[in-house]
Image: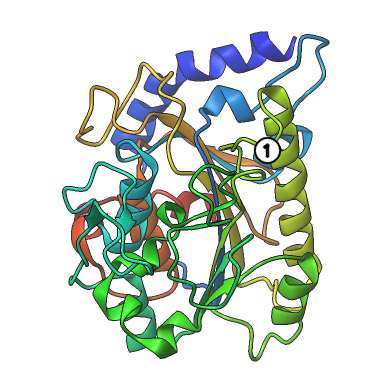
Amino acid sequence: MHRRIFASVAASCALLAALFLTSAPAPAAIHLQRIFYIMMENQGFDDVIGHETANYVLDTPFITRIAFQYGLETLSFGTTHPSLPNYLSLIGGSYYGIQDDNASCYAVPKQSPCDKAIPSMNLIDLLEARKLTWVAYEQSMPSVGYLGPQYPTSPTGPVHYAQKHNPFVYFKDIATNPARLKNIQPLNSMTTLAMALANPATAPNFVFIVPDQCHDMHGTNDCPSGDSLLVEGDKYVQQVVTTIMKSKAYTADSAIVVSWDENDYSSNIGCCGSLYPHGGGHMATIVITPRYKQPIQTAIPSNHYSELRSIEDLLGLGHVGASANQQPSLLPLIP
């Protein structure tokens, strides 16, 4: 039954998109105090919304529930492949011609090949210019401001923390700034997150959360695979979202975004000037706020540039890179 229901979603997306694009006025900006952004990995829309095992049991019961209880973008896309340029697109409004997962040239020890430092303005610059605070939580990262390309460090062992999922250390004005590096912190328990959000007066305005590769649905060689990887990712998202929602920092002026960097190359649809035939593929983006009285869905074609534009507008910031020319796709999901 679930397969029949969710198979119809993609078929109706094009029609819904046309309706939204031709009849809906541009949404007014809604300034929020705080945004929590959870970045997952490498799964398509149909993999995480209503996906079932062979025994007709949902692999992602929590993600599926929040998608239909709160806000859901049905036509959300990655910018390109592989992972890193999608993260860069979200933080800097450009993929900077990078289409690989190389370490930053600021990695310690130095890596070869590596991706050159990015000198351009980024979301962190916008936040700090407005005197707003931020933190990036990277699960399984071993220390604050860690510049290593991965952890554990063995080149033949499992990779839990991967620098390619930490876009901040690719920007020159972050990677070379000790004060900013202190805002890139390990997330090794929900207690860490709960303590950071215990006081609304000191909780960061922008919180970027990246699970490790055993919990972000990417996988590595000592993690579950297949459907079990989806199950583990769903459980971790539930822990993070529940911790945030129970915190005092989660107020009526807050939003939680759960999204994916790209899909698993299975998509046959794309949008927004795709770099490959289908860009980074069709994936899900979910928005949660305390404001919901009923579920909301939109079918505005969007990508990470649109999400960046949404974050900028919701926090009352300026715009960087390609976000300046995008429709803020998350705003219709904020009541």
Q: Position of residue 271 (x, y in %)?
A: 28, 31
Q: Nearer the viewer, residue 294 or 254?
A: 254
**Residue at 65%, 39% in the rendered image:** 67
Q: Is residue 179 above or below residue 102?
A: below
Q: Is residue 287 above or below residue 272?
A: below
Give, as a three-letter code, the residue at label 1.
Asp
Q: Quadrant of the C terminus?
A: bottom right
Q: Quadrant of the N terminus?
A: top right
Q: Position of residue 234 (x, y in %)?
A: 72, 40
Q: Is residue 320 left or right of residue 192?
A: left
Q: Is residue 169 left or right of residue 162?
A: left
**Residue at 63%, 60% in the rendered image:** 139
**Residue at 83%, 10% in the rendered image:** 55
Q: How many marks?
A: 1
Q: Position of residue 133 (x, y in %)?
A: 49, 84
Q: In the rendered image, which residue does mark 1 sit on?
A: 222
Q: Does residue 130 show up?
A: no
Q: Nearer the viewer, residue 172 or 111?
A: 111
Q: Nearer the viewer, residue 208 or 332?
A: 208
Answer with the quarter of the image where residue 27 lies. bottom left
